[in-house]
Image (cartoon, helix red, strand yellow):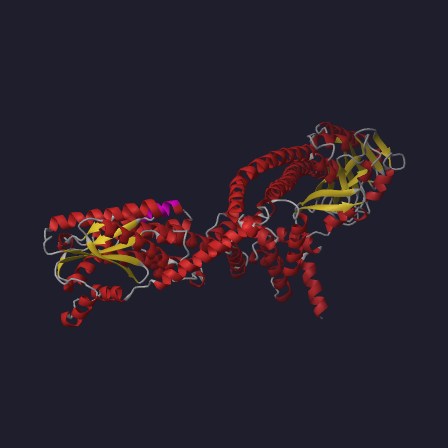
Amino acid sequence: MKRWWEALRAKADMLFAGTNYLRRMIWLGCIAVAVPIVLSGTGYYHFAMSKLSHQFQEESRSSLDQLKERMENALTRIELESLQMSAGSMIRSALSKRDFASQYVQQTEIMDALLVQKNSDNLIEEIVFYERASNVVLSSSYGSASLENSPQKDVLRGVFSMKTQGSWVYTPGIGPDGSMTYVRLLPVMKIGAPQGALLIHVRIDALRKQLFNTGQNALQQSLLVMDADRTVMLHSSDNAAIGQAAERVPMLKWILNQDGASEYDLLTYDKGKLLVMYHKTALDRVYVITMPEEVLSGQLAWIRAFVALSVLLCLCLGVLLTYLASKVVYSPIDKLAKYGEKLRSVGESKTAGAKQNEIEFIYSCLSFLNEQAETLDRYVKSVQPNLRDQFLIKLLKSNGRFDRKAAEPYLQLYHIPQAGTYVAMIVKVDNLFKEKRFLPNEGAVIVFAVNNVMLELLERYPGLQGYIIDLDGKESAAIVHFAETENDPSEQKRLIGLFAEEVCASLKNYMSFTVSVGIGGGREGIGSLHESYREARLALQQRLLEEVDAVLFYDPESVAREKVFSFNYPKSLETLLIEALSRGELAEAEKLLLQFSRTIRTSDSYDTVMQCYHVLLSSVIQALEHEGYGAMDQLDSNLFEQLKLRQTSQEVQDWFIETLFPLYRHITEEFRANEVQHAVRRVCRHIEEHEGTPTLVECAELVRLSPSYLSRMFKKETSVSFIEYVMKFKLEKAKRLLAETDHSVMEIAGMVGYSERNLNRAFQKNFNHSPKQYRNSTRTGGQ
C-alpha cells in the first residue's frame, strides 16, 4: 500500500512539475469540487431509484390486497350461491331419478330457479345442472338437453374426475374471453359416487372489469391469480395464460418454491428483469403482480436529466468559485514569495524565483519556524524554577513549619526582606481544557507566558514589589511585598486589586486567556506567608460555589459564618436527570444539570459541592451499568480524575454536557440496538414455555413493546409472522400428541387451542392429510 501511494505521489509530481502553486490549487480545487458533486448526483439518482422501487412495492402491495379482497369476495359469493342451490330441495329431489327426463314440470321449476339465480349476479354467464342417472342437462341459457346434445358435454364428462367436492376450472368456449367455472359435485354430503353436478360459469371479462383497476401503471403491470391446484385462474391481460400449470412458468415456479406468505423480489428472465410481488392466502390461492424493470427505469428519465443538469451547473459554479478563491488565497503567498526573493537576492546566494518553487520556499520557512520553536522549548526548560523560586515555593507550602534560623541565610542570600507585609496571589487560567492552540502537555509553556506578563506588569507597576513564581507548571503565583512604611491595609488591598485586574485584562487582550486571581490576606513577616497562600487558594474555591468576578479576595467573614440551615442532597433532581439521559433528551438533561448546580451551591461549601458532583457522576455510571452489561468496559478513562481537575462551576458543567452526556448516549444507543433481538428471543421462549397459548398483546406487554411494533420486529427477525409461528408450534405439538398418546382428535384439538374442524383444515393445508391419517401413518410405520 505504501509503495502504491509513493508511486501515485511521484506521478502527480511529474504532472505538476511544470506548473506553479496557483495552477495546482486551481486544478486540485476543481477536482475537489467535481468529485463530491458527481458522487452526490449519483447517490441522489440511486436514492430516487430506491424510493421509486419502494413506492412500487407499496402500490403493488395495496393492489394485491384490493385484488385479493375483491376476488375472494366474488369467489366466496359464487361458492355460497352454489352451495345454497345444491342444498335446495329441488336439486336434491332430482338426483338419482331415472325418470327425471320425463319430469318436465320439475325441470321447468329448476330451470326457472337457475335463471333467477343467474340474473341476480352480473358476473354469472350461465348455470348448468346435470343429473347423472337420467343423463339430463338443464341450462339457464338453452334449457333442457341430453348429455350427448349438450354444448358442454366435454366439460361435464371431465368434472367427475375431480378429487375435491368443489373446484374452479377454466372453460374457454363460454363468453368472449372464456369463463371461470365453479363445479360442485352432487349431493353436497358425498356418499358414494357423484350423482350429478352443478356448474356456474363466471364471465372472465366481467370479472376483470370488477377486479382490476385502470391506474397509471395498468398497461405495464400484470396481475394473475393461481388456484390451490397450482393453475392460473385469472390473468389481467393474457387469456392464453389462464388454465396453465404454474410449473410451466419460471416466474410462478419460483413463487411456489418460496416459503413465505408474501415477498417482493427482482427476477431475471429472457426479456430482461421483472419486479414481482406475490401474496398467498389461507385457502392456498396465490395473487401475483409483475412489472418490467425498464418501465420503472423509464420513469426516472426526468430524474437523470435533472441530476445531470444540476451536476453540470454546480460544477461550473464550483470551478468558477474555485478559480476566484484560489487567486485570493494565492495573493499572500505571492507577496511572501516576492519578499523572500528580495531578502535572499544578496551576492552569489541569489536563488531561483519562488514562482517556480513556492512549496520549497514555504518548506524552508516552516523549517526555520520549527528551529525557532525548538530553541524556545530549550529556553523554557532552561528557565525552570531557580533556587530562589524553589525557596519561595517551600515557604508557601510550609504549613506553619517555618524555621526562622534555618531560613535566615537564604533570605539574606536572595535579598528577601523579612519585615513588612506579604500578600500571596494565585493566577489560574480558566477553561484550559478547551484551549486548542496548545497541546495538553504544553501547560508549562502557558504558565511561562503568564509569568512573563505578570513579571513585566509588576516591574513597571508603581508601589508594588515582589516575585513571580511557577507552581509545578500548572499555575502562576505572585508574592507581593509592602514595606513597613506602607502599612495601610485598605491602600494595600486597592493596589493589589488594581494589579490583579490589569493582569487579567492584559492576558485577555494579548493572549486571549481568561484567568481567575485568588488573593489572600496580608501577613506581617515572611514567616506567615503560607497563611496568605492558603487563603488565596480558598478564595479560588469560590468559583465552584457561585458566579464571581475574575479577582477574588479572601473573605474571612464568609468562612466563619455559621450555617443557619441543613443541606440535603437533591436526589429528586438526580433521578430526573438520569431519566432524561435514558430517554436520550440531552437538552432536558442540561436544564436539570443547571438546576442541580444551583441547588448544591446553596450549601456554600466547596467540599460539599465537589462531593455532590462526584455522587452525581457515580449515579450516572450506575444507571449506565443498569442499561446493559459491560458499560464499565467502555469507559476508557478515569472520569473521577477528569472531574477533579475542573475547578469552576462552568468547567464542571461543560464537562458533564460535552463529555459525560454524549458518552452516556453513545453507550445506551449501542445497548438498545440489541434489545429487539433479545425481546424476540424472549417471546419465542415464552410461547414454548406456555404451550403456544400466549397472544400477541400478552407477549407485547411481556417485553414492553407495542403489539404492532413487536409483530413487525418478530417477522423481521424470524422471517415468519407471529400467528404463523404460533400455528406451527401448535401443529408440531398436535403431531407429537397424535404419535405418542391415545387421545382423540377432538381432545388434542382442545389441548392445542383449536376446534376439531380447524385442526383438520390446518393438517390438510400443511401436511396434505388429516390428523387421523397422520396417526395411522406414524403407528403403521412404527410397526
783 sits left or right of 150 in the view:
left
**In the depicted view, which residue is nearer to us: 170 or 638?**
638
Residue 668 lies in quadrant: bottom left
The residue closer to the viewer here, 201 or 15, is: 15
Residue at image coords 56%, 39%: 326
Q: Is residue 732 visible?
A: yes
List x then y, in percent, for residue 87.
70, 39
Query: In the rendered image, which quarter contains the N terminus?
Result: bottom right
Residue 137 sits above or below residue 261 on the image? above
Residue 30 against residue 661 in the figure, above or below = above
Which residue is nearer to you in this view: 67 or 445? 445
Q: Position of residue 403 (x, y in %)?
A: 15, 71
Nearer to me, 440 or 508 = 508
**Residue 702 in sight here:** no
Residue drawn at the location 38% of the way across and 57% of the way down: 623
Quarter location, residue 166: top right
Q: Main secondary structure of the magenta part?
A: helix
Rendered-image quadrant of the C terminus: bottom right
| Residue 630 position within the rendered picture, expressed as x and y whole percent measured from the top left | 45, 63
Looking at the image, which residue sits at the far right? 148
Region in magenta: 587-593
The outermost residue toward the bottom is 406
Was residue 301 drawn as part of the magenta stretch in this picture?
Answer: no
Q: Residue 749 falls in which quadrant of the image?
A: bottom right
Q: How many marks?
A: 0
Q: Residue 251, relative to residue 630: is it above or below?
A: above
Q: Position of residue 134 (x, y in %)?
A: 84, 39
For residue 630, side relative to residue 478 (left or right): right
